[in-house]
């Protein structure tokens, strides 16, 4: 499923990477530990987290993730926004909890790749 479709279906708010939304999402990974994401997320995945600092962008770039969804309405730090804009990483916001958001992603067919 394309990232833009997921955004529309889940009513996500896009903060960065508006020119990168036509990519095919291959799966998802939910974790707040960057070392866990580095070890287990796969290229093309969406990453669901509550982390808002700029290191999330570095991990997303290193793992070739197709986007980061911040949960509970959390907003990315300003330096995170700037880094994501420079690197072309989509950051989206959901008002849902991690549990509910991951369930909805799974309902859309987004599972572990």
Image (cartoon, rainbow, N blue to C red):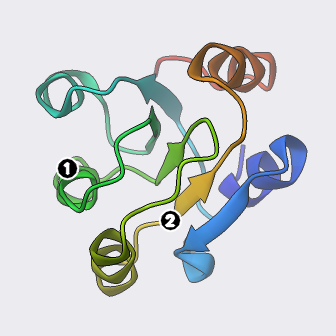
Q: Does the rendering let one see residue 21?
A: no
Q: Is residue 48 left or right of residue 92?
A: left
Who's the residue at 71% across and 14% down the image? Answer: 103
The residue that label 2 is drawn on is 90
Question: Residue 48 at x, y = what percent?
Answer: 48, 34
Who's the residue at 43% across and 61% down the image? Answer: 76
Q: In this orientation, which residue lies closer to the viewer: 15 or 61?
A: 15
Q: Quadrant of the N terminus?
A: top right
Q: Where is residue 94, by image quadrant? A: top right
SS at circle 2: loop
Q: Does the rendering let one see residue 111?
A: yes
Q: In this orientation, which residue lies closer to the viewer: 53 or 26?
A: 53
Instruction: Determine crowd level at label 1: few under 14, some 14-19, many 20+ residues with C-alpha closer than 10 A.
Output: some
Mark carried by residue 35: none
SS at circle 1: helix
Q: In this orientation, which residue lies closer to the viewer: 78 or 31?
A: 78
Question: Residue 110 at x, y = what percent?
Answer: 65, 26
Mark carried by residue 59: 1
Q: Where is residue 13, by image quadrant? A: bottom right
Distance (Cα) linking label 2 and label 1 = 13 Å
Q: Earlier in the sequence, mark 2 or mark 1?
A: 1
Question: Residue 77 at x, y = what percent?
Answer: 36, 66
- When the figure is inspected, residue 68 is found, relative to residue 48, above or below; the finding is below
Instruction: Determine crowd level at label 2: few under 14, some 14-19, many 20+ residues with C-alpha closer than 10 A.
Output: many
């Amino acid at each position: 499923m394309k990232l833009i479709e997921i955004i529309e279906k889940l009513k996500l708010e896009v903060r960065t990477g508006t020119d990168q939304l036509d990519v095919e999402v291959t799966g998802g990974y939910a974790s707040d530990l960057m070392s866990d994401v580095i070890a287990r997320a796969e290229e093309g995945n969406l990453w669901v987290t509550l982390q808002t600092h700029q290191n999330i962008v570095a991990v997303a770039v290193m793992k070739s993730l197709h986007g980061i969804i911040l949960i509970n309405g959390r907003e990315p730090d300003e330096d995170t926004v700037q880094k994501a804009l420079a690197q072309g990483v989509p950051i989206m916001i959901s008002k849902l909890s991690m549990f509910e958001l991951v369930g909805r992603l799974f309902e859309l067919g987004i599972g572990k790749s």
